[in-house]
Image (spheres, rainbow, N blue to C red):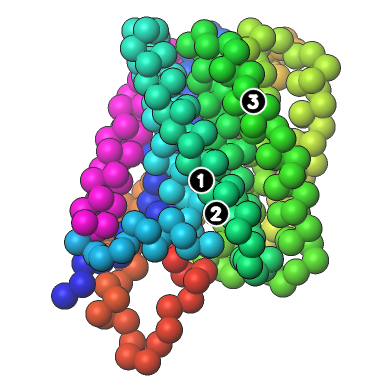
């Protein structure tokens, strides 16, 4: 029997849990919470990331051409970048507070891998011939998310010039890809259900860029932070008309697309709340933490339940209905 297929978006679980750990670490750094929860969540994220890597590598080793086929998949391929982006968050959250030098080495190594993989994807896409309808917000991951997350991690470990380079990579790719992806979403047919959760990624670039800026400048709200917040609020508001469609979706691994996107928004919100120092600011921070923790915990609980029922991963190819033809969108489910 063929092994059960491991889709590349399995790496979204560790990425989302790392995002939640980052939100709690920001809260701890702002003296809103203690560091123990962030440390525990980072440890859980590291285990999930490592488990996802082992599961995928075992699948790839047992399935001929799985790795090359998945990377060249114009729908699912971009999710592979999460395997090298997540360790940057893990190092910044779990290693930097205790061993800055070791964290710097880990962040540097994976930032280089982000750059190399982003360059490979960009060159692969530049060959042309791709159907515009296959474009989706997951295309932000290799270069926009990779560049901005790497910049944030590098800024935290003191690699300021390298951080500036990766920030430029992320921002320029955001400007280019963002307009293309938004145009596809507006003017072309709706995304298939398997890719619909990726529309939540639209809130992430402004939020992650804001976090990068806050980490670099000590959490101060300035002109650039306000500019990023303006677009970020637009994309957050744009999610409201999408709620009915989100609520109709069946649960799948793709649901994890909601996690890191909204944990980034939560982290940026915590910095903004801390900067205003209004009456009720501490209670507002607790509310943000409660909401984002509830969201990620709910998705994690649904994931465990689906895994226990054997419904989390796609069925082996040998078990698919005879005569059926796999759909490209399903490769991201």
Alpha carbon distance from label 1 to label 3: 18 Å
* Quarter where residue 313 is shown: bottom left
Residue 295 position in % (x across, y down): 50, 43
Depth check: 194 or 178 in front?
A: 178
Q: Is residue 114 left or right of residue 63?
A: right
Quadrant assignment, res 222: top right
In the rendered structure, which segment of residues is drawn in magenta?
A: 32-61
Q: Residue at x 42, y 28 (%)?
A: 110
Q: Can I make out residue 190 in this image?
A: yes
Q: Residue furthest left?
A: 1
Q: Residue at x 33, y 24 (%)?
A: 40
Relative to 146, is 139 above or below? below
Q: Position of residue 178 (x, y in %)?
A: 73, 46
Q: Residue 11: x and y, percent?
A: 39, 46
Q: Nearer the viewer, mark 3 or mark 2?
A: 2
Quadrant containing the N terminus in the rendered view: bottom left
SS at mark 1 in the image: helix
Is residue 332 a member of the stretch shown in magenta? no
Q: Earlier in the sequence, mark 1 or mark 3?
A: 1
Task: Confirm whether the magenta stretch covers residue 43.
Answer: yes
Question: Disc 2 marks which residue?
Answer: 124
Residue 122 placement, left or right of 101: right
Of 231 and 135, the residue lying toward us? 135
Determine the image quadrant of residue 291: top right
Q: Which residue is mark 1?
A: 120
């Amino acid at each position: 029997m063929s092994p059960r297929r491991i889709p590349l978006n399995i790496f979204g679980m560790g990425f989302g849990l790392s995002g939640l750990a980052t939100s709690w670490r920001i809260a701890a750094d702002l003296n809103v919470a203690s560091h123990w929860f962030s440390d525990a969540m980072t440890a859980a994220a590291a285990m999930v990331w490592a488990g996802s890597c082992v599961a995928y590598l075992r699948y790839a080793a047992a399935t001929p051409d799985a790795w090359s086929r998945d990377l060249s998949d114009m729908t699912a391929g971009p999710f592979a970048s999460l395997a090298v982006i997540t360790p940057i968050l893990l190092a910044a959250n779990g290693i930097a507070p205790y061993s800055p030098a070791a964290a710097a080495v880990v962040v540097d190594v994976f930032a280089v891998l982000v750059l190399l993989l982003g360059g490979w994807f960009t060159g692969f896409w530049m060959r042309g011939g791709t159907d515009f309808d296959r474009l989706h917000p997951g295309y932000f991951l290799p270069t926009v998310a990779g560049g901005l997350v790497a910049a944030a991690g590098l800024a935290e470990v003191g690699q300021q010039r390298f951080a500036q380079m990766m920030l430029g990579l992320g921002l320029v790719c955001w400007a280019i890809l963002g307009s293309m992806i938004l145009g596809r979403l507006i003017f072309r047919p709706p995304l298939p259900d398997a890719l619909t959760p990726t529309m939540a990624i639209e809130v992430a670039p402004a939020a992650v860029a804001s976090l990068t800026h806050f980490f670099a400048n000590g959490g101060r709200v300035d002109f650039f932070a306000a500019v990023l917040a303006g677009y970020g609020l637009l994309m957050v508001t744009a999610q409201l008309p999408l709620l009915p469609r989100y609520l109709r979706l069946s649960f799948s691994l793709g649901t994890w697309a909601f996690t890191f996107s909204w944990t980034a928004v939560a982290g940026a919100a915590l910095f903004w709340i801390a900067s205003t120092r209004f009456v009720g600011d501490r209670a507002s921070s607790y509310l943000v933490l409660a909401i984002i923790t509830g969201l990620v915990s709910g998705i994690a609980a649904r994931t465990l339940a689906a895994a226990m029922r054997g419904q989390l991963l796609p069925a082996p190819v040998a078990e698919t209905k005879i005569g059926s033809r796999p759909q490209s969108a399903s490769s991201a489910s």
